[in-house]
Image: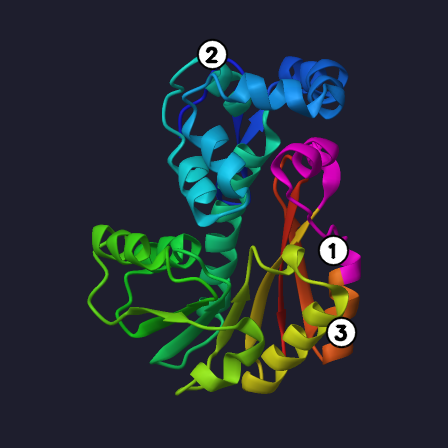
Amino acid sequence: MKENKHSVNVHKDGVDFESPKKSSKIAKKFFVNPLINYLPKRFLLWLFSKTKSPLLKECLVKAGSWKTMRISYENRPHVDLMDKFFLTFGSFPMALRNRKRLVAKKLTACIAAHEERPLHIMGVGAGSGSNTIEALKTLKDEKIYAKLLDLASDAFEYGKSLAKEAGLPDGQVTFIQGNALELEKHLDFTPHIVKLVGIIEYLTDEQVQELFDLAYRVLPEKGSVVVNAISNKHGNDRFVRRVFNLHLNYRTPQKIIGMLTQSGFSNFLPEREPLKVYHVISCQK
C-alpha cells in the first residue's frame, strides 16, 4: 500500500489502513465538502461531463455498483485533474478499501473460530465477492467454500476472474443469482458464516431485521455473522443524493447490534476503519 502526499498508512491490530493527512482532512471539512454539497447540480454535472475519470463516470451511471467498488479497490493513478480531486478528497474510495481490509480480517477471525471442515461461507449481496476472495487467498485452505449470492449477475464473471487470479481452485467460490430474502432457497448446505457487507445500507429496517432473522435461522449453533454499519461521517451525503441519486440508510453500530440482538445473536465485536465511515461487526448465534 503506497502513501501519497494526501494520505498516510495506519497500522492497527494487524491491518494496514489508509487515512487522510491532517491538512487534507481540514481542506475537506471546511472547503471541499461545503463546495460540492451546495454547488448547483447542473453545474456539477456539466463539470463531470468534462472528465475521463472512470470512477466519476461509473458513479453517474450507478453509484454504489460493484464497478465503483472495483475502481475504488484498484486505486489506479488518476487520469486527469478532476479524477485526482475526486480520488484525493472523496471519502468513499479510501473508506471502501479500508472496509475491504477489515472485512477480510473479520472473516479470517470467524473462520479461525470454527474447527469444522469443510467450512461454508454464505455471502449475501456479494457482488464480485472480492472481500471474501481476499480472505480465502490469505488462508489458502481448500476446504473452505464460499457461495456468493447477489440479485444481479453482472459482477460474477469479474468475481470468477478474481478467484482465478487469487489461485483458488475451481469450485471453492460459487456465484448464485437470487434475492437475499429468499436465501434459504439457495442453500444446499449449512453455512458456518453469513456475510452481509455492502447490502443493508440499501434496505429498510424491516428488511434488515428480516435478513438478520433469516441468518439466525440458517446458521448452526456458534455460527457467525459479519455485517457492516455505515456512518454519514464521509460528509458528502447531500452531494451523493443530489448528484448520484444514491440514498443510503445510515445506522450506528449500536443500532445494528440492537437489531442483531433482537434476532438472537450475541458476542459482538465491532471495529471501525480510520475514516469512521464504516464499522464491521462480527457476532455469533
Of the residues under marks 2 and 3, which one precedes in the sequence? Answer: 2
Q: Nearer the viewer, residue 197 or 204?
A: 204
* Measured Cα–Cα span from mark 2 to mark 1: 36 Å
* Image mark count: 3
The residue under label 2 is which amino acid type? Answer: Leu
Classify residue 202 as left or right of residue 169. Answer: right
Please report the residue visible at 64 percent of the width from the left and 56 percent of the height from the top. Answer: 202
Element type where label 2 sits in the image:
helix
Q: Name which of mark 3 and mark 1 comes first in the sequence.
A: 1
Using the image, tell me which numbered label, if any, was put on residue 82. none
Q: Amino acid at mark 3?
A: Thr
Q: Which residue is mark 2?
A: 81
Q: Which residues are magenta?
A: 231-255
Give the residue number, with chain letter if any, for mark 1.
253
Q: Which three-letter amino acid code belongs to the residue tagged 1?
A: Pro
Q: Which mark is residue 261?
A: 3
179 or 138, which is in the foreground? 179
